[in-house]
Amino acid sequence: MRAGPGDAKFSAMVNPIELREARARVLARVGVDQRVERVPLAEACGRTLAAAVRTSSPWPTTDRSAMDGFALAAGAGKAAGTVMPVVGESLAGKPFAGVVPAGAAIRIMTGAVLPEGADAVVPVEQTSGYRGAEVRLDEPVVAGANVRRRGSEQVADAEVLRAGQRIGPAEVGVLAVLGTTTVPARRRPVVVIVATGDEVVPVEREPLPHQVRESNSWSLAAQVEACGGLARRVGVAPDEPVGLRRMLERALADADVVLTIGGVSKGTHDLVHGTLHDLGVGEVFHGIWLKPGKPTFFGVRDGAPPCYVFGLPGNPASTFTVFDLLVRPLLAAWLGEAPGEWGARLPVLSGTWKVNRRLQAVPARVAIGDDGRLGVALVKPSPSGDPFELTAASGYVLIEPGVGPTPDAMLPFVGNTQGIVLP
């Protein structure tokens, strides 16, 4: 017989653990997924590199001009006031054909190849009297001035992008410069999101007084996609064993990670953790000393590959916060990215909090104080069912149990992007 929610063996939160211990247990269970996909360059932004990218040749590949101006050889006789004949030009797409004669100059554009016989570029702004046949130098010429030397930015076979690096717009530009048309990317983790509760209705419906719109799976899906995962919302499971089990079975069959919403606390209809146990999910922990987020469940169903399961609380702020603090680091590690470290402290510039016996994750944003210091501004306190204050935050400050506000408070700030802690 399946153990019910009142069974002591499977009752919620028998031994809650500290948040940092929970994070350590999560990261101890996950490894880098070794499956690789070849992604067209046009679809690479937001993906995670599965292999380092190296240069095939020095960059720039030739000496090039860093300015619009005149290319010439520096040396004796090139003092301010020198007048030189202009014998041609080098454009970015049409280099000068030949050698620049001693004592002569050519017009050159930014990015154009520096021709043989020239070792410096005089910017247009440092010349006067140009009439097409000759130019007057207003300042002395220094060898190497305004020249991007071959290999000055990257040598051949240099690692320019590392394995595990998230591809953003700048990385796409680097890949294009190197002629990369397909990119080796980590396979995106499939994250199936299962909401629960007879009280929730689809967002397009007008809820009755005892109902609420199902919003948590939407915000979770957006968080998953921002982490580089592939989110799949599968609907709302009922608060009854048969329908819940059927939906969780389907989720576990199709997912690398399963996120459930609600049903993991101590209520008589909190059936999720017991059902997960019946479906072969081994509990790693259930309950953390965190406000909000105490009922959080984490387990693993072993296999090749394993499936990681988080039972998240049902309140919007709790769901959102626990994702950033625990699920986001798991997805980063799964993709081979750095999950980030916690510990950097910033001064509190504004806002307050109440003393609590649990660690508190208080939404906050990075700000600059009147004195120019970088610090954090805490958003105003709100219930864990309030999703609105999260829009004003860029992360969380972690406040230890029993710690109250002080004028010189310094608190750890955890950014909500890839688990990175800001310095």
Image (cartoon, helix red, strand yellow):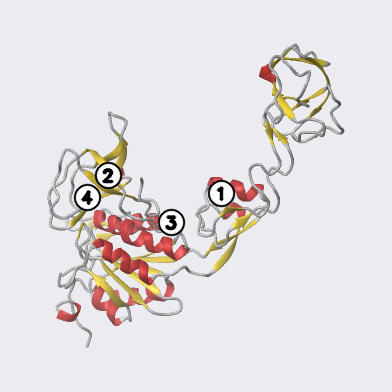
Foreground: 275 or 75? Answer: 75
Q: Which residue is mark 2?
A: 364
Q: Give the residue displayed 45% in from the left and 76% down from the top.
A: 305
Q: Counting other residues with Cα less than 10 Å from the Cα at mark 3, is it few (<14), some (14-19), or many (20 or more)?
A: some
Mark number displayed over residue 171: 1
| 4 vs 1, front mark | 1
C-alpha gap between disc 2 and disc 3: 22 Å
Q: Give the residue displayed 74% in from the left and 12% down from the top.
A: 81
Answer with left or right where residue 204 lies relative to residue 144. Answer: left
Q: Earlier in the sequence, mark 1 or mark 2?
A: 1
**What's the amino acid at mark 2?**
Ala
Q: Which residue is mark 4?
A: 386
C-alpha gap between disc 2 and disc 4: 15 Å
Classify residue 146 by image quadrant.
top right
Label 4 element class: loop
Q: Position of residue 86 (x, y in %)?
A: 82, 20
